Image (tube, rainbow, N blue to C red):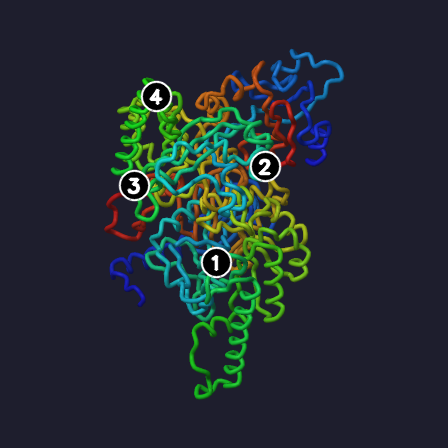
Amino acid sequence: MLALSLGVLFAALPQEAPPATAFAVRGAKVYPVAGAPIDDGVVLVRDGRIVQVGPAATVAVPAGMAERRAAVVTPGLIDAHATVGLTGILNVPHDQDQLDRSAAVQPELRAIDAYHARDPLVGWLRGLGVTTVHTGHAPGALVAGQTMVVKLRGRSADQDVLVPLAMVAVTLGDGGRGPGGKSPGTRAKAVAMLREQLLKAREYAAKRQREPDAAVDLGLDVLARVLAREVPLLVTAHRAHDLQAALRVADEFQLRVVLDGAAEAYTMLPEIQRAGVWVLPHPAMARTTGELANGTMELPKLLLDARVPFALQSGFEGYVPKTRVVTFEAGVAVGRGLPAAAALRALTLDAARLLGVDGRVGSLEPGKDADLALWDGDPFEYTTHCLGTVIDGVGYAEGPR
Amino acid sequence: MLPRPLPFAFALAVTLAAAAAQEVRAFVGARILPIDGPAVDDGVLVVRGAVIEAIGARAAVVIPAGAEVVDVAGRTLMPGLVCSHSHIGAVAGADGSGPIQPEVRALDSINPRDPGIQKAQAGGITTVNVMPGSGHLLSGQTVYLKLRDGRTVDDLLIRNADGSPAGGIKLANGTNPQRDAPFPGTRGKAAALIRAQFHRAREHQRKIAAAAGDPAKLPERNLGLEALVEALEGRRMVHHHTHRADDILTVLRLREEFGFRCVLHHVSEGGLVAAEIAAAGVPCSVIVIDAPGGKLEARNLSLDTGAVLDRAGVPVGFHTDDGITDSRLFLRSGALAVRAGMDRDRALAALTIANARMLDLEQRIGTLTPGKDADFVVLGGDPFSVYTQVLQTWVEGVKVFDLADPKDRRFAMGGYGASDDQALSLCCYGQGGQ
């Protein structure tokens, strides 16, 4: 029966077909996120963009226009931090490009030079409603490299990229220690190295301004953009004292900082709220070992209650599952007190705002990209299926998953 | 070797046990999922001491005079969950000295204060097969535990009729046991090593039989071979880690050769050889993971493995493999299998009675049947809904988890100290840091 409905939905749209010029998606419940949920709603799509959203009674669907139906229609989901595309499915050295361990500080490593759009896990996430990810270098070095924002169309980094340089990934705490006795070997050393690098970048920026022909340093060039507040630091840290260090450095250099993981953030919610930084709480199902020992599945709810802005993520996994699925992680957070509406907002419009792509994605509004996820029920329920996704007006059917 | 309980604590434990033995409780008004029969709406479960006395619709069950009536209207009751493959309790098995170490017992490593035990209770798990890891061809003897609140591992053991601790033996093939010699470097070498070991066990078994009870003729004691003889004689279940289709068939080939009883664990590619597994009549303990990959053998892992094997006639259970998946979310494994096409009732059985059978404990646990152990969970709603919480977990008539208790709630949700070794409820001095 599911297979049948899927066939009806997507028969007109083989995978990776060129965008149908125009079609309608009708949902018994449509969640535009930018506005109130719509009973029996319609989303009109033309040339890859949303042209109209509203109740079926008020949206005129032209005669003969293809129409796809689902119980629930949401914006395509946004995973606010993943490593998919850099951490391949096989988990062998040849397909793991999230971390180069030759040096502690390498902000010059670009995600677009590493992202593998055709890795099977890209399709796996797309099959579960995810249409955009913020992905890139992973935790594990003091400054591991850059991140990017990409649509999960599965073509190439260059074709699918939304933001080529989104953030610069920093790891504090145990996860940021150097391998084999290399620096940083302690928390204090890590922060000292980071501050020294930022001071260098400040001098570099000043020099480049004075002397436009001065030699380019790729790493300092990127950190100069961090100092200019063009690019945030994505600071992976779990222990409260590491989170405090991140806020201290942000304050000293007036940086934009996003706290990633943040297992013990609940011990310092007022400080985080006052600092005005975003938090990407660790996946609800993240293993509570090591620096996450004090983690709680209630963290997203606690952030919401404390009015700390947040988005949800699948994070980095070194083993199995090789990627978590933000849809599933959000579901478990919803089962632990996060209201479903807040979870959906965190997975769509709030994530888009954090990543600076809310002009393109994150809600069902006229003029935005036609990125949708179709469901046969509550997207957060264990037994609901994702029937398919639409990205830039292109339908993808990975099978009901 | 055996820990000596403090006299006053021992007395307290005895008193509590005696009290539990006399108590009669009737849980009234819940939707009851007995697993061995259809759901009962507005049901009654009567528990006397540690045992289920009666179960049925409200009109059909006479509540014994003097019973404590517990109102569970609007809740769902089902048997305590049985996890057929877990690594809680800080378990360790074989060391790096060799690939085959059947003399090593998991029970000698268990830390009963490991917070994984409390977290498993919070997930509704009442019985668990705690296994050593898969980095060896044979990593040791597994131990079946009841998740009672206990001070020593002895408090958690399940005893066989002869008084010995119940457990199986853990084998593995595929890539996990492969490393430098003396470990195997290839699949062919792995199979040859384990076959040679089973031949040694057969020889030991033959010598014991030839002695015909004469102590003078018995072979020298050999702890490892004794455990394998138990496996050869069907008294100790072989729990075999295996992922890839060809590795699964290798296990079936060894089983055919040596005749041991066996459960296949993980079976990431089980769906590819479902007919062969069904023909062998071997049960599968399936892992449910959110995405394929992470290791070469799990490349084809699929959410529908349980459904495919079940439809092929294979007895299917699920497991947490905790810490690979979280014991607090064990119900979710069944729910995702339903999402992937498994029949709901079969998925419920796969979390309870099917796993009990894999541990030879189906006479005691796995269904809500009069005469069985009073192991059950009280759920806030449908067992396969993300919105449902495990509210209470009971083992042998004793409540071991209550979400309304802030200390238990911390295990269920997490928080500061939730992963530290725990001072247990019968302990009178360890309240600091709670």
Mark 1 to mark 3 CA distance (whole Å) = 34 Å
Q: Mark 3 is on which residue type?
A: Pro
Residue on which the image places disc 1: B134
* Lower sequence index among marks 4 and 3: 3
**Residue bearing mark 4:** A208
Distance between the alpha carbons at the discs numbered 1 and 2: 32 Å
The Cα–Cα distance between marks 3 and 2, rounded to whole angstroms, is 35 Å
Question: Looking at the image, can residue B405 be seen?
Answer: no
* Res A23 quadrant in image: top right
What amino acid type should be assigned to the residue bearing mark 1?
Ser
The lab-note entry on whether marks 4 and 2 share a chain reads: yes
Residue linked to disc 2 = A118
Q: CA distance from mark 4 to mark 2?
A: 39 Å
Q: Nearer the viewer, residue B169 or A64?
A: A64
Q: Secondary structure at mark 3?
A: loop
Point out the image quarter for the C terminus of chain A. Answer: top right
* Chain bearing mark 3: A
Q: Is residue A272 left or right of residue B75?
A: left
Q: What residue type is disc 4 on?
A: Arg
Using the numbered discs, state the Cα–Cα distance from disc 1 to disc 4 in whole angstroms: 56 Å
Pointers 1 and 3 in contact (C-beta within 8 Å) = no
SS for callout 2: loop
Find numbered disc 1 in the image and state the secondary structure of the residue it sits on: loop
Dot 4, crowdedness within 10 Å: few (<14), some or many (≥20)?
some
Judge whether B275 appears above or below A382 on screen. below
